[in-house]
Image (tube, rainbow, N blue to C red):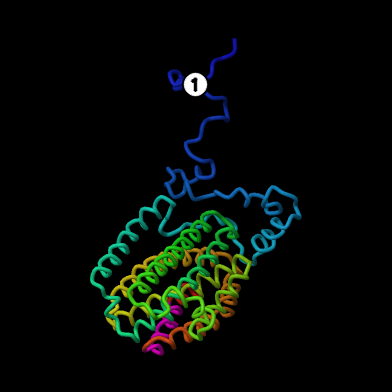
Amino acid sequence: MADKEPTMSNKADYDPPEGAKPLKTWSYLSKSKRVPSEYEVVSTRMFYNRDDPERPWTIGLNEPMNVWYRKYGNDCPLKHDDWEAFRDPDEITYRAYNMIQDGQENYVDGLLEHYAGLGDDKEYPEEWVKVLASLYTPGRFLFHTAQMASSYFFIISPSSVISLCSSFQAADQLRWVQRIAYRTVELANNRPGFGFNEAERRHWEEDAAWQGFRELMEKLLVVYDWGECFTGLCLVAKPAIDEAFFRQFGHIARSRQDTLLGLLSEAALRDSDRSRRWAGALVRLLQEKDGNQKHLEAWVAKWLPLADAAIDAFSAALPDGEAAAEAAKRDTRIFRNGLGL
């Protein structure tokens, strides 16, 4: 009679065949000789399509999707022996992201409710309302481009631990698209006649203030190599957007008694800081391998003039814009200089 399968009652006495002893964790995590963290369990080696460099997807070898991933993923000039060695400094998981951002969203909801009750929108001077109509509410177009670029980086980057960081960054951008849209409707209701919820697309497509960021982001959206996409987006374009639109615009808003915009901008910069931490960690991983630094430097040099021009054009339309432009460009360089770029 065949041996019975071990049950819950006799499992402790079951002696598995030699070489088949159950592992205490996933095999690829067992070498660390410690219990893996939640982050490591749910974030590492999640993409099966990184296993075979020649056939990322289980379709014909020369099907367009496989050709695309080989060209823009595998053939990227940035190299490393183990992409799974990357770790997000904040160890953000899907569960952790939702917990963190639930608190952030509650905070922003509280701000919006508080200032709606004060009726500040109705008290802003006409000149400031015009600034909001032309430079703030069209911002949802800008952040949608950043969200799309982050989403592309998610699907093309070389490992799940890297891709997940970009997925949360994309979610951050989408959150601020929604918040700007919410403020657009509030302002449309409280200050009719200024084009709120009507003229944003025209401002984005035609106003001189936006054409630098339009050019920067539209060109970046057709960069397919994952290394250049990462460099152009996370090391150049996104810092430029964050410093000009959130930090400097937020400072100016406070000086014009628009405390709500100042506080919303500060809340958004918390997301920006987290993005810079993981981007910096990836740069440091890349710098471990000879040859990567020159590619990073070349891409930064390629995209920096467009980013600086975008900051200049946007800031020129702001009150006290010249000082804002210089401060924004200075702070983007401080970030990159800290990474040896």
Q: Which residue is mark 1?
A: 14
Find residue 325 and report its image quarter.
bottom left
Instruction: Pick the residue in front: 221 or 42.
Output: 221
Instruction: Pick the residue in front: 312 or 19.
Output: 312
Q: Residue at x 39, y 53 (%)?
A: 98
* Residue 188 seen anywhere in this rendered image of the structure: yes
Instruction: Pick the residue in front: 305 or 85.
Output: 305
Q: How many numbered discs sit on the rendered protein?
A: 1
Element class at badge 1? loop
* Residue 244 seen anywhere in this rendered image of the structure: no
The image shows residue 56, relative to residue 241, as above or below, that is: above
Quarter of the rendering occupied by the N terminus = top right
- Tag 1: residue type? Tyr
The image shows residue 153, relative to residue 263, as above or below, that is: above
Q: Position of residue 314 (x, y in %)?
A: 46, 83
The reply, left or right, for residue 186 in relation to residue 59 is left
Give the farthest residue toward the front.
Answer: 193
Which range of residues does the magenta coloring cover?
Answer: 320-334
The reply, left or right, for residue 188 in relation to residue 53 is left
Q: Position of residue 102 (x, y in %)?
A: 35, 56
Find residue 258 and report its image quarter.
bottom left
Principal secondary structure, stretch drawn in magenta: helix
Residue 324 counted in the magenta span = yes
Residue 282 counted in the magenta span = no
Q: Residue at x 32, y 80 (%)?
A: 253
The image shows residue 338, relative to residue 313, as above or below, that is: above
Q: Position of residue 238 (x, y in %)?
A: 48, 72
Give the farthest residue toward the top.
Answer: 1
Q: Position of residue 43 (x, y in %)?
A: 49, 50
For disc 1, the neighbor class at 10 Å (few under 14, some 14 to 19, many from 20) is: few
The image shows residue 325, relative to residue 117, as above or below, that is: below
Q: Residue at x 67, y 52 (%)?
A: 56
